[in-house]
Image: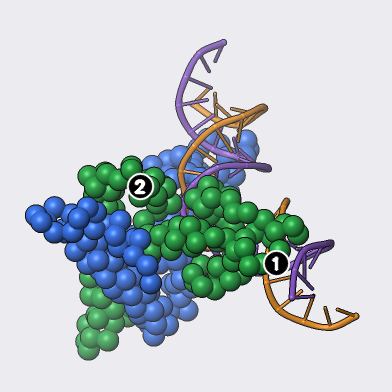
Chain colours: A blue, B green, C orange, D purple
Amino acid sequence: MPAHHGLTIGRLASSSGVNLETIRYYERIGLMPEPGRSQGGHRLYQDAHQRGLRFIRRSRDLGFGIDAIRALLGLAEPGRRSCGEVRTIAEAHLLGVRARIADLVRLECVLAETVARCGAPGATPCCPVLEVLEKPA
Amino acid sequence: MPAHHGLTIGRLASSSGVNLETIRYYERIGLMPEPGRSQGGHRLYQDAHQRGLRFIRRSRDLGFGIDAIRALLGLAEPGRRSCGEVRTIAEAHLLGVRARIADLVRLECVLAETVARCGAPGATPCCPVLEVLEKPA
DNA sequence: TTGCTCCTCACGTCACGTGAGGTGGC
DNA sequence: TTGCTCCTCACGTCACGTGAGGTGGC
């Protein structure tokens, strides 16, 4: 019985866009179920694994952490669907993303202002960036 | 000769707001110069160390990576000041920050839209978040 | 003497990626 | 047989933080 009984990890990797070692990593940490093996010990993946990996990948693309994904995967099981809990996780994540954006925007302002003063004619003696970094107090 | 000859690492840490182990880490990777030691082997920091650490800390607050800070510290030395090089580093960093913001804003949009559909009356059957994550294609 | 501070060294964090050294399978 | 794919295991990444076990210094 040849490889018709499932996808090899390489094919799963290239079809999903997830690195081969990352797939093994997901298995190691229990995010992906262990697949069957060929006689030679090679992993053979079924449709359910493909769907699971796609779910994980989409979640990562949306910035969910591994723990959040673990929770989402549990809630995604038929019969355990709980829209409220899913929403809670997604909203918490959304707040985190917004906080990171706010931090970065503040940072962007300071940097942009400082760099803009670099070329300003007749402005500060030499280097506004170093001045900001060296300023006492 | 008691501790009058410099700040202990603990005092430097609390006065700068940088964790004590982080200061040792900066020394280990060559970002901070090695300070003198007391007879008992305790580090004793001088004013120059304080100024250096403040520079590093400000740079980290602005999101500069360790390698960028190493470069900035070199350029901050008297006689080696090069406004153009400093500006180049700062502008590259600014572009990186803007790219991260753009990524996060895109992500925020998708998340916000999806979560908003959660409570929508008579909308999708159950859970828009899971639907997004499970969608085939 | 107490007890707070300091010392070094090793390991943990996060989500993976890389590399070594070896083998399956067409 | 070739050569591509797969296997496991260990270590590297980034910028630190934590903990163990021991000591300085007032």
When the figure is inspected, residue B50 is found, relative to residue B67, above or below; the finding is below
Q: In terms of image quadrants, where is residue B10?
A: bottom right
- Looking at the image, which residue is at 27% across and 52% down? B90
Q: Viewer-proximal residue, A116 or A79?
A: A116
Disc 1 is placed on an element classified as loop
When the figure is inspected, residue B105 is found, relative to residue A33, above or below; the finding is below
Whole-percent x and y of residue D18?
64, 69
Tell me the tag on residue B2.
1
- Looking at the image, which residue is at 50% across and 58% down? B49
- Badge 2: few (under 14), some or many (20 or more) residues near its Cα, within 10 Å? few
Q: Distance between the residues labelled 1 and 2?
A: 32 Å
Whole-percent x and y of residue A131?
29, 60
User: Which residue type does callout 2 highlight?
Assistant: Pro
> From this viewpoint, which residue is outermost toward the bottom?
B121
Tell me the tag on residue B120.
none
Q: In terms of image quadrants, where is residue D6?
A: top right
- Looking at the image, which residue is at 63% across and 54% down? B36
